[in-house]
Image: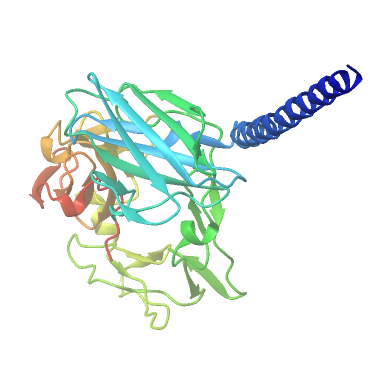
Amino acid sequence: MEKKGLSAVITTLILIALVISAIAIVWVVVKNTIEENISSTESCFDVLGKIKINNKYTLYDPISNKLQFSINLKDIEVDNILILISGGGVTKSLIITNEEKIINGLTNYPDGSSGIKLPAKNEGLTYVYDMSNFSGKPDLIEISPIINGKQCEVCDALYMYEIEGGLAGDDDCVAESTETTCETWVCGTKINNCNEEINCGDCEEGYSCVEGICVEEDCIPDCADPSGVVCGETIIDQNNCGSCPSGTNCESGTCINASCEIEGVSDIYAYVTAYIADSLTIVDISTPSSPTIVGTTGSDLRLDGVFGVQVIGNYAYVAATHADSLTIVDISTPSSPTIVGTTGSDLRLDYAIGIDVV
């Protein structure tokens, strides 16, 4: 009887030991799973406020049917970002990675290149998405980071609306580098992607800054023949500066002929592009307290989404964002500016904004 009783006790102890071992094994598995989930949750929690859609540079153009959106990254490491674009009952997903790759329908802004990748830390990038597969304008854009192979919850979303002639405001803008803003300029100031004035450098003593180039203060740039009504056409050459012809004066590096004023090409006019009105308007500013509109092209599809303008001599050179074109306007008669030529819509001028006639 004593041996049977002892055997039962041993059996019970063995069973208890087995149960404890099983519990220990289960606990190790559960513990590892919990730690992995906590680590993943902490990683996803860290992205809050660090990955954002910059609505200052996010807009939809109903004419070209393209969506421009901008993503800002702060001090955080992510593998990929999942982007969901919804509109007209359709949702499209895009995954942008740290490695440059081609994504169907997506290009970089503003150069239109196809190599797409995520912004670097503390930087922002803007993209353009072709929405030709959508039946209407976008309603919602969402972004979700992927960290350590795990997709996090949506960290930012923007309910879109059609923006005519402007960008949505946002104070949380990540500025591009000074080198990106200034490009080839070595002096003067330029405006960066956050609409901030950036100093590109200063000239040495005895030099003045002219369009980003340091020019000797006593050096007057070469200029076109100012006879008749042609004036103000300047060729800036840092190493070869000439003097103005007799009967002309140099103003800000430009040879000005007084006879131009009677033809309406002088400092008394402001040339204004109207993005919504699709027009170029000439305003008499000779009396600053009472500017007066003297002429306009009127609404014209060749000036659809008109943006940048540069005036040289009797002509205004105009970039049209929606028309994807460069248009030339004869302004020799300020009361009746007339379109004399245009490139017409061209994908190589898609989203034309800037003008630089040299």
**Residue nearest the viewer, comparing 234 with 273:** 273
- Here the colouring is rainbow
Q: Quadrant of residue 5?
A: top right
Q: Is residue 137 left or right of residue 302?
A: right
Residue furthest to the bottom in view is 239
**Residue nearest the viewer, comparing 167 with 108:** 108
Q: Quadrant of residue 43?
A: top right
The answer to whether residue 330 shows anywhere in this view is yes
Q: Relative to residue 10, is residue 321 depicted above or below?
A: below
**Residue nearest the viewer, comparing 20 with 200:** 20
Q: Which residue corresponds to the image point at 72% horizontal and 27% vertical from the top-left?
A: 23
x and y, in percent, of residue 169 in the image: 47, 29
x and y, in percent, of residue 54 in the image: 47, 35
Image quarter where the N terminus lies is top right
Q: Relative to residue 324, is residue 25 depicted above or below?
A: above
Q: Which residue corresponds to the image point at 29% horizontal and 27% vertical from the top-left?
A: 164
x and y, in percent, of residue 319 in the image: 23, 47
Q: Quadrant of residue 100?
A: bottom left
- Tell me how many marks there are: 0
Q: Which residue corresponds to the image point at 38% horizontal and 83% vertical from the top-left?
A: 240
x and y, in percent, of residue 207 in the image: 55, 74
Residue furthest to the front in view is 1
**Residue nearest the viewer, comparing 202 with 256:** 202
Q: Relative to residue 270, is residue 246 depicted above or below?
A: below
Q: Is residue 162 left or right of residue 219?
A: left
Q: Is residue 186 left or right of residue 60?
A: right
